[in-house]
Image (cartoon, helix red, strand yellow):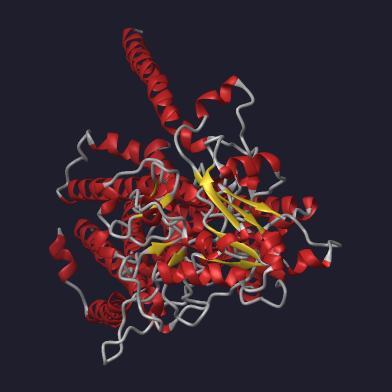
């Protein structure tokens, strides 16, 4: 089936070339970082994780979001998702690959990455994260490929694959739960130390993942004649709406706990993120923007007229995705380092090489996604 | 009917097997975690009840008592300790706070003791230099977080770093509630064209290795000096002032244990349950 990715029109090859270009430029920046150390990034002693880890955290959610298609289709036999479930699985593959690239980009000694396997340490949540992420990647490659290949060969999917599909459902939950546990188990970081973190992560993931998928499906409808089906699209909007509502509900609860209790440890980071603290406010603009577009889009997802408007729908998807990207892929991780354990505030600004590497990893993810979706489209086109 | 029964038996059988396995697996997991989770949320988890008995620390636990009064009285003493330590351990000087590496340094009271306010406190307290460093916790969150065991507790209770195993993920830096860890954002061994080291203006101590870029480092309580029968360099820098007292806090006959027994001391962030081994006389 892979050969399908090599047959395309000019626009397809143009897009591939563009992505390869971005990857090459970012690749050069990575070589620069590799030889000069992480000092070329904006990270510091006080904000020791930056865009790499925050993007990683967000993308684990995008990967987990695929389960919002797998679950209705396979468990509840929601036939309308038949055409797009494979897209959810392949999106998970691209997202996990990006996660792994972000982790490697963030390591001070990337050549030693396999030490995690050589010296397995069950007490470390990073050890478990490695297991669940790679496991999820394996499950989605296996399930996606086997199901698509049987479809290609006009044969029913083999029965044994069902087992892996069923395993993949709780596994999707596990990847984002364990990723939350990287943060919520650290005794000295008040902003992260919250039991609601895993549910909040999952809620935002189940909104962001399907929003991206819906956006891509709408684009493919325009450029590749792929129709996901009106029923499937409307069901996706419902899923996004409920997940987004849950997400903002959870965020609201965090606000209540912080500002009603007025415990300094709880309010400090929220102050910094949304109002500025002691003159430091470089995240206030993005965080307020994120909250605004997120809430507006959520309300729009509840209004039938907006949901059914084909011009508005992609914009709403972008708003939800961007809102959650800023919230989790920026504010959440960076905010946890403010204030530092000694009560000081240090702000972080990414550098050009860092942004170049981030762009390259996004482009690499888009490339994987494009190739996989191209195969799906070609197989579908053959059927017609 | 029959099919349903078979199905039921199958499910029952699987559940039973899972039921037998789960508690054993669970208790094994818990046992493994006992040492790591001791202390709970109660700060100093002393052996008050039998439930805590098995958490009793065996073996040595080296620690420090820092007499901040002495540092308030003797100007420049704290800086002397920092200088001695950083020279001993080849701590590079990058000249900017972003890349800064520090093993032991001075903070104000309200920064060092988070959650303790200096509001309406005496002026002397506000100006008191507080030396802060790795607390060599009895229950260190950094050791728990490290995915490669590159940071570990040695037989003397010292939290150590293996610079050759560290992958530079910086999970330990996020986990440490004391900000005691630094990362080599740059290559500390960088040299000028003439071969002179860029970040060691005063030369290097050949007795201790320099680090490579991309690894985390922090105070090692002078494990090597202790092995050689010497005092930690910060303690030595204090001379006869008794500004810092070093010893095994688990040995009731040690000098440090006597000081702890007879003097009121406080620890940094005891509510995090890490059981820090550095104590302060204020």
Image x and y of residue A153, in percent: 14, 48
* Quadrant into which the C terminus of chain B falls: bottom right
Q: Is residue B15 left or right of residue B254?
A: left
Give the residue drawn at x 59%, y 56%: B244
Give the residue drawn at x 39%, y 26%: B28
Image x and y of residue A105, in percent: 34, 68
Image x and y of residue A72, in percent: 43, 42
In the rendered image, the vertical position of residue A97 relative to residue A67, given as above or below: below
Residue nearest the viewer, comparing A143 with A171: A171
Q: Is residue B208 left or right of residue A67?
A: left
Give the residue drawn at x 79%, y 52%: A260
In the rendered image, the vertical position of residue B140 relative to residue A57, given as above or below: above
Residue nearest the viewer, comparing A122 with A259: A122
- Is residue A47 in view? yes
* Quadrant into which the N terminus of chain B falls: top left
Image x and y of residue B88, in percent: 41, 68
Residue placed farthest to the bottom in the image? B194
Residue nearest the viewer, comparing A333 with B269: B269
Which quadrant of the figure has residue A55?
A: bottom left
In the rendered image, the vertical position of residue A384 relative to residue A354, given as above or below: above
Residue nearest the viewer, comparing B181 with A83: B181
- Is residue A270 in view? no
Q: Is residue B121 left or right of residue A104?
A: right
Count of marks, rendered view: 0
Residue placed farthest to the front in the image? B240
């Amino acid at each position: 089936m892979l050969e399908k990715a090599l047959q395309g029109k000019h626009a397809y090859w143009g897009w591939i070339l563009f992505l390869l270009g971005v990857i090459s430029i970012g690749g050069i920046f990575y070589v620069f970082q590799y030889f000069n150390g992480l000092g070329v990034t904006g990270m510091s002693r006080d904000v020791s994780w930056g865009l790499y880890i925050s993007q990683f955290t967000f993308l684990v959610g995008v990967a987990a979001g695929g389960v919002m298609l797998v679950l209705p289709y396979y468990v509840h036999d929601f036939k309308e998702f038949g055409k797009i479930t494979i897209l959810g699985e392949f999106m998970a593959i691209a997202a996990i690959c990006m996660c792994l690239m972000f982790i490697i980009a963030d390591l001070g000694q990337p050549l030693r990455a396999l030490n995690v396997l050589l010296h397995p340490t069950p007490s470390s949540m990073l050890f478990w994260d490695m297991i669940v992420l790679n496991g999820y990647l394996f499950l989605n490659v296996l399930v996606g490929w086997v199901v698509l290949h049987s479809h290609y060969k006009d044969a029913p999917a083999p029965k044994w694959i069902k087992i892996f599909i069923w395993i993949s459902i709780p596994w999707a939950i596990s990847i984002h739960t364990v990723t939350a546990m990287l943060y919520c188990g650290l005794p000295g970081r008040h902003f992260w130390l919250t039991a609601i973190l895993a549910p909040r992560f999952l809620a935002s993931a189940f909104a962001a993942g399907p929003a991206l998928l819906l956006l891509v499906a709408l684009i493919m409808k325009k450029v590749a004649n792929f129709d996901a089906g009106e029923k499937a699209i409307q069901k996706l909007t419902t899923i996004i709406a409920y997940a987004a509502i849950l997400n903002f509900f959870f965020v609201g609860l965090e606000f209540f706990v912080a500002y009603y209790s007025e415990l300094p440890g709880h309010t400090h980071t929220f102050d910094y993120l949304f109002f500025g603290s002691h003159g430091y406010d470089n995240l206030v603009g993005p965080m307020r923007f994120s909250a605004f577009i997120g809430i507006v889009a959520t309300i729009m997802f509840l209004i039938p007229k907006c949901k059914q408007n084909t011009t508005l729908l992609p914009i709403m998807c972008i708003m939800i995705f961007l809102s959650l990207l800023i919230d989790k892929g920026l504010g959440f991780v960076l905010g946890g380092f403010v204030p530092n354990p000694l009560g000081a505030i240090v702000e972080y600004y990414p550098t050009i090489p860092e942004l170049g590497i981030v762009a390259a990893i996004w482009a690499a993810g888009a490339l994987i996604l494009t190739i996989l979706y191209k195969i799906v489209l070609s197989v579908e086109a053959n059927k017609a | 009917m029959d099919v349903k029964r078979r199905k039921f038996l199958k499910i029952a059988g699987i559940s039973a097997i899972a039921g037998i396995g789960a508690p054993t697996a669970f208790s094994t997991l818990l046992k493994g975690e006992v040492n790591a989770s001791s202390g709970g949320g109660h700060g100093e988890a002393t052996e008050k009840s039998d439930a805590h008995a098995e958490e009793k620390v065996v073996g040595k636990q080296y620690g420090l008592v820092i007499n901040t009064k002495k540092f308030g009285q003797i100007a420049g003493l704290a800086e002397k300790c920092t200088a001695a330590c950083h020279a001993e351990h080849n701590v590079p000087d990058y000249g900017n706070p972003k890349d800064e590496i520090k093993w032991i340094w001075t903070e104000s009271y309200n920064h060092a003791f988070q959650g303790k306010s200096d509001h309406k406190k005496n002026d002397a307290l506000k100006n008191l230099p507080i030396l802060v460093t790795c607390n060599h916790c009895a229950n260190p969150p950094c050791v728990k977080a490290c995915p490669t065991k590159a940071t570990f507790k040695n037989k003397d209770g010292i939290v150590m770093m293996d610079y050759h195993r560290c992958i530079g993920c910086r999970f330990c830096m996020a986990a440490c509630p004391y900000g005691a860890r630094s990362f080599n954002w740059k290559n500390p061994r960088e040299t000028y064209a003439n071969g002179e080291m860029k970040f060691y203006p005063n030369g290097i101590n050949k007795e201790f290795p320099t680090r490579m870029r991309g690894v985390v480092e922090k105070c090692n309580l002078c494990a090597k000096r202790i092995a050689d029968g010497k005092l930690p360099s910060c303690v030595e820098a204090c001379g006869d002032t008794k500004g810092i007292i070093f010893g095994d806090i688990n040995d009731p006959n040690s000098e440090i244990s006597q000081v702890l027994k007879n003097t009121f001391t406080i620890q940094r962030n005891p509510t995090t349950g890490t059981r820090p081994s550095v104590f302060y006389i204020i």
